Amino acid sequence: MNEDTQNAVIRLQGVDKSYGNKRILSQFDLTIADGEFVTLLGPSGCGKTTVLRIIAGLEQLDAGDLLLQNQVITQVPAEKRHVNTVFQSYALFPHMTVYDNIAFGLRTQGLEEREIQDRITEMLGLVQLSGYEQRKPAELSGGQQQRVAIARAVVNKPKVLLLDESLSALDYKLRKQMQIELKRLQRQLGITFVFVTHDQEEALSMSDRIVVMDDGRIQQQGTPREIYESPANLFVANFIGESNRFDADIESSLGNHRYRARIESQSFEIHSKLELQPGDRVHVLLRPEDMRLKELNNGDSEAGLIGTVLERNYKGMTLDSLIELDSGKQLQISEFFDEDDPDFDHSLGQRVAITWVPSWEVVLPYEG
Ligand SMILES: Nc1ncnc2c1ncn2[C@@H]1O[C@H](COP(=O)(O)OP(=O)(O)OP(=O)(O)O)[C@@H](O)[C@H]1O
């Protein structure tokens, strides 16, 4: 048994799942470590919820195995797994108080009322709802209802908590706040959280590890930073954050992972961990925030990437510009304001030179 397996709380091994004749998951493997906050991220319909429902015991597998703490539980019914789920619709009992909603599962387990009371007091403290015991769900805000649903799901200390788009019904500000609270709660409880979302910002800010899925397959898994800074392919690069994409031809190797590459009919130095040969074609991706603009005035040399400001958008923290290169290609550039230059701005139609932070380009094998 390797270290990975020992630490695993959930393992899906070679899982196949179809609905009718539509294959959703094919030989799907996923390992989730004990105490991890893992997010399944991907576009609508890619199979995230199916994975969650399989772990919860709400779907049968066509092939493969599901293990909880190294025990095969493929045939164990949902209520016997130490796994709870919080759905997008909180599914609280409307006629019951907050207290009774949280107590419901504990009572069916036959716990004594004193123990139930102690646990509920502790839980309501953790989700910052002490004093709300006698309220009904209708007397709570969306965020408070969500916290009751979470308290109810963790009060019997499951090994794993599954959260399916659990924050998507909340407004932007409340969602941000709940993201921080969920992360804190997970740390305090030490329970493994498996979170499903199609919101990449939410995934980046909450997860220890992100599993990016498309069409029933894992495209990449890694820390938020690995996924953002070193996307494995074009799908991941496009799905997470914005990127400007160039096609480039390698001209020569400069050694030490540096290459000269032809981009937009000009020669640039790029950096890549790939082993590349002259003549190889690659994609060079640049994040808008890694690019820089310099205004050109009459008489300035027009070498390098040159373009015209098509749009400028003041965003508070950044000035976002849409630039059209002379080739017609358009680029998104996001610049932070410079304290030393309070008048920093661009005017529409202004000629600009475009550069980027050296070696921050992401280079991917050409996918066509
Ligand atoms: N019970 C079902 N019967 C038939 N098809 C289903 C069923 N449940 C899901 N599907 C289909 O399986 C595919 C994967 O669905 P799933 O809910 O896992 O996707 P998802 O990534 O969670 O999407 P979303 O973000 O929209 O919830 C979709 O094409 C969906 O239409």
Image (tube, rainbow, N blue to C red):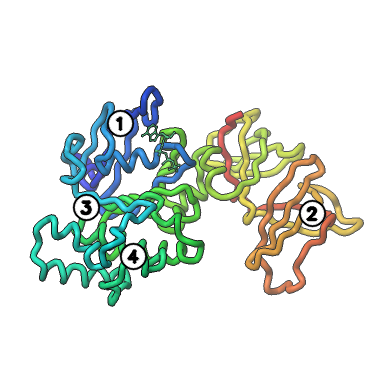
Along the viewing direction, whichever of 238 and 145 lies nearer the viewer: 145
Q: Which residue is mark 3?
A: 159
* C-alpha separation, residue under disc 3 versus residue under disc 4: 27 Å
Which residue position is annotated with label 1? 15
Return the x and y of residue 209 as percentages of the image width and height. 38, 50
Q: Residues within 10 Å of mark 2 (few under 14, many from 20)?
A: many
10 Å crowding of disc 3: few (<14), some (14-19), many (20+): many
Q: Earlier in the sequence, mark 2 or mark 4?
A: 4
Question: 222 or 156: nearer the eye?
Answer: 156
Cα–Cα gap, marks 2 and 3: 54 Å
Hey, what amino acid is under mark 3? Lys
Question: CA separation, marks 2 and 4?
Answer: 52 Å
Q: Earlier in the sequence, mark 1 or mark 4?
A: 1
Q: Residues within 10 Å of mark 1 (few under 14, many from 20)?
A: some
Can you identify the residue that label 4 sits on? 137
Where residue 65 sits in the image (x, y, percent)?
A: 23, 33
Which residue shows up at 48% across the image and 41% down it?
44
Q: Between label 1 and label 4, give the one nearer the viewer.
A: 4
Mark 2 lies on a secondary structure that is strand
Looking at the picture, which amino acid does disc 2 mark?
Answer: Val
